[in-house]
Amino acid sequence: MAKIAGAICKYAEMTSSPTGRLPSADDLLVLLAVGRTGRYSSAAAELDVNHTTISRRIAVLESTLGGRVLTRSSGGWELTELGRRALAAAEAVESVVRGLVTRGDDAESLEGVVRISATDGFSAYIIAPAAARVQRRNPSVAVEIVATTRRASQQRSGLDIEVVVGEPQVHRAQAFRLGDYRLGLYGSRAYFDEHGTPQTLDELSAHPFIYFIDSMLQVDDLDLAPSFTPTMRESVTSTNVFVHVEATRAAAGIGLLPCFMADRHDDLVRILHDAVTVRLTYWLVTRSETLRRPEVAALVEAIRTIVDEQRPALLGLAEC
């Protein structure tokens, strides 16, 4: 009981109000949901209330605290400085409430939904097994994976974590370098049997190229990666790297593929190892307040662990 009372005193001090009233715990938890998702609609769905209730609760909280806790942006709602202080209090409330309902063997169990976006290959081979590890230990944690290849968004509305290629330039967020990976040139054995295997960069011009759709590629590092192939004609292009792999396996041409994906297939052969090796970096982006959620921190730790375990595969060492 003393522990709970201490926590209550702590968040009461953090949200001392010019009106002389303490904020409602319910209102603080509403702010917590909006602060994590950036949207009233997402917070309403999470709390099983309607949009109007969210708006009303935030208005009451702002009246109690005597200032704005949220500000509108192009990508959703962002916390003000007062909002960030109130969010810290809300996290204390959430922690106390969770402690009250946790019993016995479930004392270390986590719960909640974590939404993460990442490239297709990283989602499949790194995030999926990381999510499985977290979920096996914490059955009440659900992980939603949004597979996409893009820059880190300035407004992370609706997302707890983003994994992107290349160092991101973001505001009000933390970026962590996860690790490097390599791209290499691959073709199928059937393709090389029919068309011959290029031995030099100049010989690549006689072969079709499989990669991203140039006009739709949003990531600078991936856009610059095929600079050695200016004379290669496009064959099959796609926004999805799994399409690149399968088109290469189907003998549509030579693909510039992530080694950790291509090396899984015995029918693919890597060529020009020394002349063509593109090294890129995965970065993880999240808000500091989001990372304080235990379920988010657990997933981030699992991702880092699997990246370390898969480092040889990510770097294509088996083929170098």
Image (cartoon, rainbow, N blue to C red):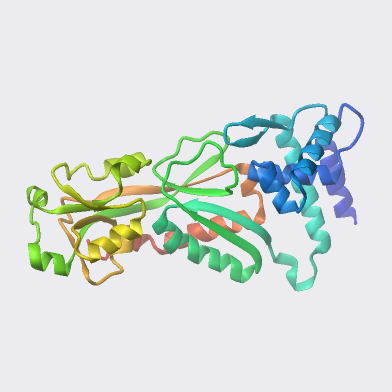
How far from the left and from the top, in percent, is residue 28?
A: 79, 43
Q: Residue at x 60, y 55 (%)?
A: 114
Q: Quadrant of the C terminus?
A: bottom left
Q: Is residue 257 left or right of residue 93?
A: left
How far from the left and from the top, in percent, is residue 193?
A: 9, 68
Quarter assignment of residue 197:
bottom left
Above or below 2: residue 187: below
Q: Residue at the right extreme?
A: 20
Q: Residue at x 86, y 38 (%)?
A: 23
Q: Is residue 95 left or right of residue 308?
A: right
Quarter assignment of residue 190:
bottom left
Above or below 266: residue 29: above
State how many labels appear: 0
Q: Can residue 301 be seen by looking at this rendering?
A: yes
Above or below 201: residue 247: below
Q: Say which of 161 and 316 sits in front.
A: 161
How far from the left and from the top, in percent, is residue 148?
A: 44, 51
How far from the left and from the top, in percent, is residue 17?
A: 86, 30
Q: Residue at x 58, y 65 (%)?
A: 134
Q: Residue at x 81, y 55 (%)?
A: 97
